Amino acid sequence: MTTDPETTEQPEPGPRDEGADRTAADRRPAGPADGTAERTTAEGAEEASAAAAEGPAEKAAEDAGDGPGTDGDGPTAAGDGPGAGETDGEEPVAAEADGKSAAEMSEAEAELLAQKTERERIERRKAAKQGPVEAGGKLSGTAAELLAAVRAVEKGEKPAGSVFSEPPAPRRPAVPEPERPRPTPPPAAAPAGPDPAAVEAVRAVLAAGGAPEALAPSAAAVLGEGADVLLREDPWQLLRVEGVRPEHADAFARALLGPEVRPDDERRGRALTVRALERAALSGHTALEAPALAAALGAQGVPDPDAAVQSAVAEGDVLVFQDALDDVPAAAPAPAPAASAEEGDEAEEERPVRVLVGLERYAMAEESLADGLARLVNTTPTGSAEDWEAAAARLRGSAADLVRAVAGHALVLHTGGEAARAEPAALLAAAASLGLRVCAVTHTADGRRRLRAALAGSPVDERAVVTTAGLLSGVQGPARDADGALGLDLLVVLDAPQLGVESAAVLVESLPDGARLVLGGDPAVLWSAGPGRVFADLLAAKVCPQVASRTPDPGPVGELVSAIGVGELITVESPGHEVAVVPVRDPREAVHRTVQLIADSVPRAIGVPPEQTQVLTPGHGGAVGTRVLNAALKERFNPGPGRFGGFDPGDRVAWSPEPGRTVLGRVAKGDAEGLHLDLAGATVVVPPDAVERTLRHGWAVTAHQAVGQRWPAVVAVLPGDAGAALDRAWVYTAFGRAERHLSVVQGVGPALAEAVASGAPRPRTTRLPALLRAARQA
């Protein structure tokens, strides 16, 4: 069979001889909306049957995180987007970082500790930030000296004529804080676990309840001191351990408490309420509306969902909120002959509200984020308008518009595709030329590399370009003062759609008074892995200037992706074989064609070697998921016995140190210390006990794992059973990862065009819009 992307002929669709070899003429150089018949595999049929059996209650709340939005293999997998993976969905327990030095912490542990510290600082800083921002509160350089001189004149300490007679001080250079060494995890030592005696006590309880004793270390770590006593008193606390499902906890409770245990037990209702909200967070919700939560609890066999929620609220496990629906017109009350005028006025003032239930951690994050954003909106930034206008005059188009918007506002949003990233780069260069301390944040190391290349030759030091994880963990970016504020004047966040509420809250609260914030990104890509949709909520709230880029993505791939962004799957001309469609009729053929494209067709026709081509597919499971594709690609490109936990030196891997974050690299070597990974030049040692939890092979990944990265060539594999997992955001994100060439292994037939036309992604329930409205009215 040949699948060379060289051929651009477009044969008429129709039935084909299954016994004949496929030729290059089978491929269409256009949008992949061909008429190929879709064949559902046995595996796909089984998955469809299972999905159909979930019932309407599961659909009402996606089982509060278990429903649609997966990457085809169940709940969240490490590094995927919400609800996109293979574990039961509970977030893995973060290792305690207390008592460790920076050199002993892994990057993930350092980031978690930094976020914990910042949340403690948030409350202190909020208390000190009541009222308007004092003009010149944290100025430096010439502006600070002029302000001091004016105040000296006001106090009579200096004659007025001397204020402007002195030569101005030179502008300080825009040199960022030197990048500190990245802490590396100890090669052979895993994070310290719970006390062995506590583990043994928990193991005894688990054994008495018939639960796997292997859960003892995790249960002891999650439940803390006295875990054994807590489990005996409330067996459903076992649901807090990763991998435990409600039916497991019910069986454990019956074994410990006796067969008289009832489904309406308050302890069971509380535990399932918390679990439902945690599952909802994995699907991106920061809270759930009361009816959706009740539906999720009803699906788990809770007889009285309202009573379960009230019990959880009384115990402080969850919080209840009432958000006014200001955008919904109030219903006019029916006239009542006996009603007084005062009663009529009260009725007219009633506004509809929605009742939300959420976990405290996300409620605090959203409230802190809303307060910080409102503070930026109400801040008038300092600086010379003439200097900013001169900088804007040197630019053209939407880049100049962005500079002018930032000149007069402390919070600005910027939207655009991949080519539009040049505009924030121009802003950074202009601000640095004005003597401002700048910092740029990208979602991935690959994005950091590309932005540094765009800033080459500008006044911006490359150390001022950091990743989100690096800035939050403190291993990259400017230093912080005693209050935790970053030493900068302008923070530009690219890939802002990937910010969850907790990360966004820490970033905003880390800004010093008088600093400017620019949030930029492509609103059409997949949303953040963490709960929330910060960028989309801000765009909808319209609380600050928004600059939409007018820079189109170039080439046939850019034309195709731009059309997908507006809901159209078009035919594009690709004289240089930039876009190729490879129709397939069954999973076996899809796997074969994918390997053939990477090994032969793309290198021969496009000149892109296999190591620079990335495979993307909707899910991990199924007949053409990442597992099957990675097995086939490993056999072709790096065959081996997998003697290091299924991996061999030279394997491409996807490392996920925490949910929602994936770093791609290769296995350098394996030894008793673990697997030594080369991740874009950085070396990481993964201990043996963390290999299965944090590593996958990386020849094929999901679109959620690929967000923020690009490759010279991409092969997007769409098997026949993937139609239900596709939507416009997925297709847009996957196809947009290609720089020079895109091959589409098309097995879904017309379902691809339907997915592109499907419109907005699955909704997320958040409180940020209502909080922003309330903050503006305060």
Image (tube, rainbow, N blue to C red):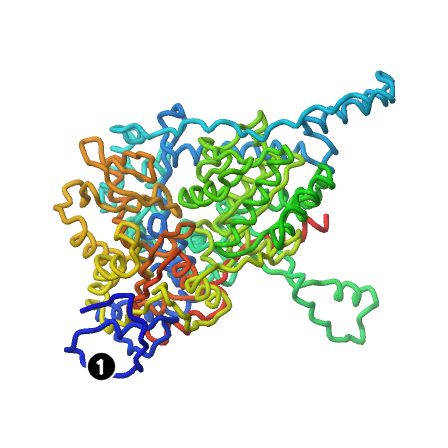
Q: For the point 77% across and 75% down, which residue is it? A: 335
Q: For the point 46% across and 58% down, which residue is it? A: 525
Q: For the point 54% across and 39% down, which residue is it? A: 507
Tell me the element at label 1. loop
- Check disc 1 and report the residue beneath it: 16
Q: Is residue 283 left or right of residue 21?
A: right
Q: Is residue 359 left or right of residue 253?
A: right
Residue 222: quadrant of the picture: top left
The percent position of residue 479, horizontal first and vertical second, equals 53, 28
The percent position of residue 254, horizontal first and vertical second, equals 29, 51
Nearest to the observer: residue 375 or residue 436: 436
Q: Is residue 401 above or below residue 6?
A: above
Q: Is residue 16 above or below residue 731?
A: below
Q: For the point 34% across and 30% down, which residue is it? A: 184
Q: Amino acid at mark 1?
A: Arg
Nearest to the observer: residue 78 or residue 631: 631
Q: Is residue 509 above or below residue 659?
A: above
Q: Is residue 274 left or right of residue 507?
A: left
Q: Is residue 448 above or below residue 724?
A: above
- Which residue is most to the left? 641
- Do we see residue 310 in this rendering? no
